[in-house]
Image: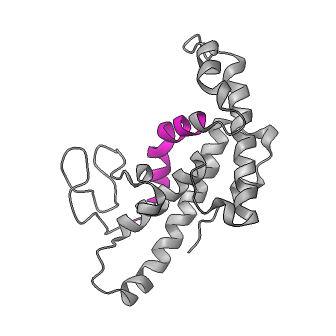
């Protein structure tokens, strides 16, 4: 399996906003979740008794999406497609940086604080990318688990100490995994 991120490569940088980037990341996550659900029966047949549940498989792909967004994908530089996507993401986050530092939103944000936090991070904007992922990871998790039925983690993973519901989600709507903060080579 490979992550379907074609729509992320097609966005024109001048049209990017944090909102439509989130929509496109969620679209990629939703398609990724559908793909995994389609291959899951084949995987179970090939590896009977595996503890790799549907939720775990989705969590690993979710973490890969997070790595790609944050510029931490270890396999990115191994092909031209990965380089192309990384270059596009640099453009997108440069545009988002310019947008958020142009004006403050309703006086809630100090423009200089944002420039100080993110400005020295050009051209990759890793801090901005990290913050964007942190702010949006719950929405991306909902997208990748969209349509999941009859699957839950094999152990308690929710903050409350409970198991996930039958759709790999906690009743609190918190993301039940921290795989996205585990280095890729350890997953």
Q: Residue furthest bottom?
A: 46
Can residue 175 be seen? yes
Q: Position of residue 35 (x, y in %)?
A: 53, 72
User: Which residue is found at the position 34% from the left and 59% from the top?
Assistant: 168
- Could you tell me residue 161's position as x and y percent? 18, 48
Visible residue check, residue 62: no
In front of the other: 161 or 64? 64
User: Taking 125 as reference, is 150 above or below it?
Assistant: below
| Apparent side of residue 175 relative to residue 125 in the rendered image (left or right) | left
Total labels drawn: 0
Residue at the farthest left position: 161
Residue at x-position 27% and y-position 83%: 49
Name the spot of residue 55 as percent of width and height, x first. Answer: 36, 64
Q: Dividing the picture into quarters, in which one does residue 119 lie?
A: top right
Where does the image place residue 111, in percent across and percent down from the top left? 64, 15
The C terminus - image quarter? bottom left
Position of residue 125 in the picture relative to residue 16 (left or right): left
| Range drawn in magenta | 128-148
Q: Is residue 35 left or right of residue 87?
A: left
In the orientation shown, which residue stands out farthest toward the top? 107
In this view of the protein, which residue sits in the foreground, 57 or 128?
128
């Amino acid at each position: 399996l490979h992550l379907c991120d074609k729509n992320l490569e097609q966005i024109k940088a001048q049209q990017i906003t944090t909102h439509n980037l989130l929509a496109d990341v969620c679209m990629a996550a939703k398609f990724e979740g559908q793909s995994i659900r389609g291959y899951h029966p084949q995987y179970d047949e090939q590896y009977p008794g595996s503890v790799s549940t549907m939720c775990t498989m989705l969590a690993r792909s979710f973490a890969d999406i997070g790595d790609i967004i944050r510029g931490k994908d270890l396999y990115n530089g191994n092909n031209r497609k990965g380089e192309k996507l990384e270059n596009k993401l640099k453009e997108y986050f440069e545009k988002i940086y310019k947008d958020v530092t142009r004006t403050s939103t309703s006086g809630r944000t100090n423009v200089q604080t944002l420039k100080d936090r993110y400005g020295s991070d050009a051209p990759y904007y890793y801090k901005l990318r990290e913050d964007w992922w942190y702010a949006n990871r719950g929405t991306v998790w909902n997208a990748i688990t969209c349509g999941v039925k009859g699957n839950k983690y094999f152990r308690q993973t929710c903050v409350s100490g409970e198991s996930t519901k039958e759709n790999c989600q906690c009743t609190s709507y918190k993301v039940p995994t921290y795989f996205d903060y585990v280095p890729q080579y350890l997953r």
